[in-house]
Image: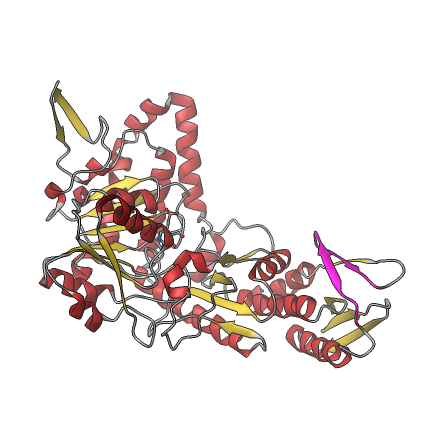
Amino acid sequence: MAFEKQAVIEDLLSAEGLIHLDNAGAALMPRCVLETQIEHLRLEAALGGYESARQKHAEIEAVYESIARLINCRADEIAIVENATVGWMMAFHAIPFASGDRILTAEAEYASNYLAYLQLVRERGVVVETIPSTADGEVCVESLKSMLDDRVKLISVTHIPTNGGLINPVEEIGAVARANNILYLVDACQSAGQLPLDVETIQCDLLSATGRKFLRGPRGVGFLFVSRRILEDLHPPMIDLFAATWIDAEHYELRPDARRFENWENNYAAKLGFGRAIDYALDIGIDAIAAEVTRLAQKLRSMLAEQSGVTVHDIGKRKCGIVTFSIAGIAATEVESRLRQAGVNVSMSSPSSTLIDASCPNSCVPRYTTISWIRSWSMSRNWLQLSRTRAAIKLARLDILYRYGQHIAHLAGDRFQCIVVDGLHRRQWIDGADLNAAIDLAQNHVTGQHGADFRFHADCLMGHVRIAGAEDAVGIHIDVDFLFHRRLDVDLG
Ligand SMILES: Cc1ncc(COP(=O)(O)O)c(C=O)c1O
């Protein structure tokens, strides 16, 4: 099916003027996903929780089929769980590790997974080792091959790390794991919904993912894939009366399918919403989504790279839709909050999310251990959002980097203007042919003045700026939204 961008845009329910670039955190659900959940919650309120689950039995079962279609497996190889972490942990802690067993993982491994390795290092004496990365930043498959021996019990990697734009070569790693008969666990939390996933091609035994990120499902739901090749060998770390049948005073029997990794109580509204979100993505086509995500992320990266003081930190030969950048001299928390004030949602990622990668000494890729960075996702409404984001970043930089005064941008007739206010309350209007030109000119103006007469600094409080250094501090509201709304009308019209 062709990618109907306009239909996707119309399915968004986001607040007026909001740009949401945070699918790596939690995406905005399409209208039908919200409605599916509300409908089920209403049914629960009307009929009762158990009764409505019974009534929706077929639809609930269909969610397993949808996930199976998404990753090319059988429905009985799927457990639907609370989130990616629960899925991953259930799988990991089901593996019968013994002292001396080796776990091989990626440098850009997700913090929670690595913490679980460390827990088993402490409790069972396993050994965890990171596979070196290539110069481009992804797992080096040749190095992996050279690390293998009889003690390697598990190869466990994150497909798309939580930040850094990287896509790890999960298929090549899977070929090595399968050829050597080693268990293979893939964290697909950030890749599900963003890239095509096929467990037959990846050749993984276990794979976990979440609902709320690129699949645009509800929060609080995720899934675990457990290959039927290994299911019988895995005993879940926690079982209840759903996962197993109590036979007599001494015995129980585990379920024969992957649902042995589930437990009895469920958020059925979220589960049904999750199924709807997956169907929605499959209707668009994961290939089409991947192409659009890649295109827009690449565009955002080049826009960011044009900005002086902005560093894009993404690594990997192939890059995904997570765009990671920092601005020299400005804490990521501050950039995040300024962008939020300008109506652009992004989320901040700290080095401790992928600690090994963030502190890797040998990499040719610049790494930052002392600053945090911002990640965002760029498949949004359209090009306009990127241009707004660029403008917002410029505004944030003007505002924060130079710590000089304050400016307000607005549309005056056909022209864009920025007002620059210095510490003596003097205002100057800067005219530009478009928003970015106006901001650039304003920025040059500020830069030109900086260090001469104007050495005042601005403290930002709840969207208002107090300019210190003058007798009476003035409050100036930063309001770029009205400008963008007008722009939005023009461009979308
Ligand atoms: C790579 C990766 N794995 C796992 C998770 C955890 O997912 P969840 O919060 O759904 O458990 C995240 C969350 O950001 C992630 O980025």
**x and y percent of residue 193 in the render?**
34, 56
Residue 125 appears in the figure: yes
Q: Nearer the viewer, residue 294 or 47?
A: 294
- Quadrant location, the C terminus: bottom right
Judged left or right of residue 238, residue 375 is: right
Please name the residue shown 42% across and 56% down the image: 353
In the displayed structure image, the side of residue 341 where residue 347 appears, left or right: left
Residue 206 image position (x, y, % from top left): 21, 51
In the image, is 360 to the left or to the right of 153? right
Q: Is the residue 132 above or below the residue 257 in the image?
A: below
In the rendered image, the vertical position of residue 331 relative to residue 247, given as above or below: below
- Apparent side of residue 98 relative to residue 270 in the rendered image (left or right): left
Report x, y in % for residue 140.
25, 71
Point out the image quarter for the N terminus.
bottom left
Quarter of the view holding residue 237: top left
For the record, the magenta segment spans: 455-469
Residue 462 lies in magenta, yes or no?
yes
Does the magenta portion include 482?
A: no
Q: What percent of the width, then of the height, locates residue 453?
A: 83, 76
The reply to whether residue 490 is in sight is no
Q: Residue at x 24, y 41 (%)?
A: 79
Front residue of 66/127: it is 127
Q: Residue furthest right?
A: 471
Residue at 64 percent across and 60 percent down: it is: 485
Q: Nearer the viewer, residue 474 or 408?
A: 474
Of 90 and 4, nearer the camera is 90
Q: How is the image coloured?
A: secondary structure
Q: Residue at x 45, y 46 (%)?
A: 31
